[in-house]
Amino acid sequence: MTKNGQTQQFDKAAFKAAVEKHLTTTYATTLANATPRSWYLAMGRALAEFTTTNLLETEKTLAEEKARSVNYLSLEFLIGRLTGNNLISMGLYENVSQAMEEMGLNLTDLLEEERDPALGNGGLGRLAACFMDSLAAQEYPAVGYGLHYEYGLFRQSFVDGRQEEAPDAWRGAEGYPWEVLRPELTQQVNLYGHVEAYTDENGTACRRWVPALTVEGVAWDLPIVGYGNKSVYPLRLWECRSTAPFNLARFNDGDYVGAQFPALEAGNVTKVLYPNDNHDQGKALRLMQQYFHCACSVADILRRHHAAGHTIEELAKLETIQLNDTHPTIAIPELMRILLDEYKLGWDAAWEIASNTFAYTNHTLLPEALETWSEALIQAMLPRHMEIIFEINHRFLQVVEAKWPGNNSIKRKLSIIEEGPQRMVRMANLCVVSTYAVNGVAALHSELVKRDLFPEFNELFPGRLTNVTNGVTPRRWIKYCNPGLSALITEKVGEDWPAHLEKIAELEQFATDADFQKRYMAVKKENKQRLADWVEENMGIELDTNAIFDIQIKRLHEYKRQHLNLLHILSLYHRLLNDPTFDMHPRVFFFGAKAAPGYALAKDIIFAINKVAEKVNNDPRLGGKLKVVFVPDYRVSLAEILFPAADVSEQISTAGKEASGTGNMKFAMNGALTIGTMDGANVEMREEVGDDNIFIFGLLVDEVQQLKQEGYDPYRYYQADSVLRAALDLLDTDEFTPGQPGQLSAIRANLLDGGDPYLVLADFADYVKTHEKIDAEYRDQKTWARKAILNTALMSKFSSDRSIRDYANNIWKLDPVNR
Ligand code: 9GP
């Protein structure tokens, strides 16, 4: 590293010349005509010159060093904007800001020109992005493998309060300046067809796949820049293209669609990100996406492995493949197929390699998210893979038989194939059977994986099931998004905390320092103002920054219980209007959430919150005490404004349902106090900050299970609690939809007659009481400041650098390679 954290020499004049050159030669714009967007693009291209060079050099070093590396396979990488973050990692933020200033441009404005690459749905995809950042920052050799979706997660707008979806062409017409096409890495991917038996030249009986369709996988690399070092790792995204040439004869005959048919079909594979979070829809195109992703990635891993001079027998020694959820599971039979059919290894030798190469992360216990694929579908699309899955299962069931002789019910439960009218392949079971490590994503979640989801597997494969608690990168989620707080931290603990978050603990000693408290709270106020300005400019709602900013931002899902938050808001509304003795500190409730397009109740909840917002924001009787803001199109770049501005963080899922959460960590690092259930990583956050500095409420996992077993009756709570009753009944009136009662009734009906599957009513009273405590404590600003500072100081465990070290030391056995 050179001085000031720069990772390369920076020649300002040369950089300015490069920007101008890209402006004119890459974007064909004159200096006089250049728009802020073309300046941003040209700047991006000029910066990518550094990262592409470093990427190629890193690849070379790693091959020469014969380094063991991790291949992170994920259908989602929710990377967010790269420019600002990369500038920070390269240590060039100030230099580039100055260079652009000299050209009459403001860097902050230019950064706003970048569209978010939204190649993920939520926590799972964002975690993958944080992990890539931490791998590069700590120089653990890695390649991220994903898909180059033409359209990312849909753009959300509200029309009369209802969610509308529009396609997200994240690259724009000009392409994304950070990506680089790698034509030499193109792979062929086969689909459909049949399997045939044949005898090879040695007289051995063999099987081979005769595919019916071949498409092409083209690689685009995005640079993952190591913070403060020279390593740049590729995030390699595959785009599907047709191998068939354009059919000019058919075109000339007037068959315009037919002439392009293969290209149109192939283009569909990577056309769009499936917009479901924690839900598996079982669509054929999705399976094709998954296989396309895996086939390209496995082939590329083998290419790299051989290019570095290694033999196939050494694969598990030099490469490990981490499966991010079950989405890339088909990589397992794909590698087996290659080892058996192409390398001609025997089953045992192939299995030895494959089962020691793959590891799997489980991110959910929700049954609707645990993927199963119909055997018939796999059989048609990937006939050889289906044979291999049957063989894996056959051998596995012999192991089960040896352990539990004659016990067919255990066999039925553990089998990779689920029997029924339509036989299904259970991808999670396939993963547990075929990998050397399976991890959950927070201590509680990993315990539940062992206890409730896979107890027999845990007995069968002792030590295979383990935990790695999630984390988030402090570079994006403190340093970049909260410059005020970052400056304050640097002043107190020195400047290397973004790479060594343990350092942040030194802030603890300033928690009671009156001067520090004042400055810390002043930063919070500035961040609240930044958010308030955004809301006023984009939504026309005026906010008072003296109010408590209470924020819930995450995907819209019943288990995350945005409707519990809504019921609390309704109860406050009711009390402000009906109880003259009721007093509360002004509060703004923020929401940000996308609902899967086919998820009706989630969309109803969005509509209800928007309708309630419309009313309360304009009701003079409330004296400005209550505001509700649902920010449209919640995305990473908006999150960067929301997290730093929060006083209160809502983490209120039903206990046992949220595997970890990662927004909870970002809020706390930025000094918000959590109101949360004993769920996911909230449990470990409480351990870190202590019970006094977090607001825990609600039923525990075992209490939830017990209540359900006893027969949960939501009406009991409705009848016993008049505040709850009033809030729920408001949903049946036309209070928020004048002249149109019943528009919000679906939520009430789900909670009362629908059985309230996520126990919203059971947790309501405790939730309200805990919010009253928050209200009282916020009024004592010194105590609040102390608690907020402690939250920042005590969050070092939740750096994704620590998560990656845990993976590297305990699972991958990976060493850093410093450049
Ligand atoms: O729902 C979990 C979320 O709790 C966790 O933080 C995230 C990253 O581990 O994964 C989410 N799971 C999924 O999106 C689907 O399994």
Image: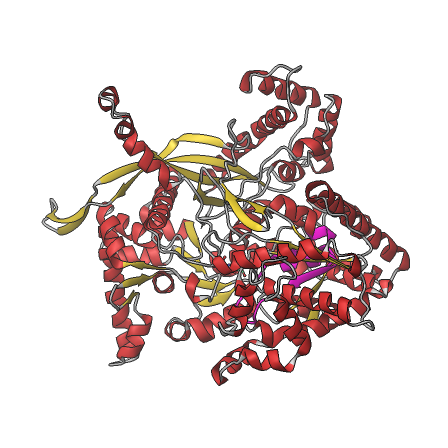
Residue 655 covered by magenta stretch: yes
The image position of residue 453, as x and y in percent, is: 43, 71
On screen, residue 312 versus residue 729, left or right, reads: left
Q: Residue furthest bottom?
A: 710
The image position of residue 286, as x and y in percent, is: 37, 49
Residue 495 visible (yes or no): no
On screen, residue 547 versus residue 293, left or right, reads: right
Question: Which residue is depicted at the point 67% across and 31% down?
Answer: 110
Question: Which residue is depicted at the point 44% across and 70% down?
Answer: 463
Q: Quadrant of the C terminus?
A: top right
Residue 685 covered by magenta stretch: no
Image: 719 above or below 267:
below
Image: 612 above or below 575:
above
Q: Which residues are magenta?
A: 643-672
Image: 528 above or below 225:
below
Q: Nearer the viewer, residue 441 or 500?
A: 441
Image: 142 above or below 29:
below
Residue 798, picture quadrant: bottom right
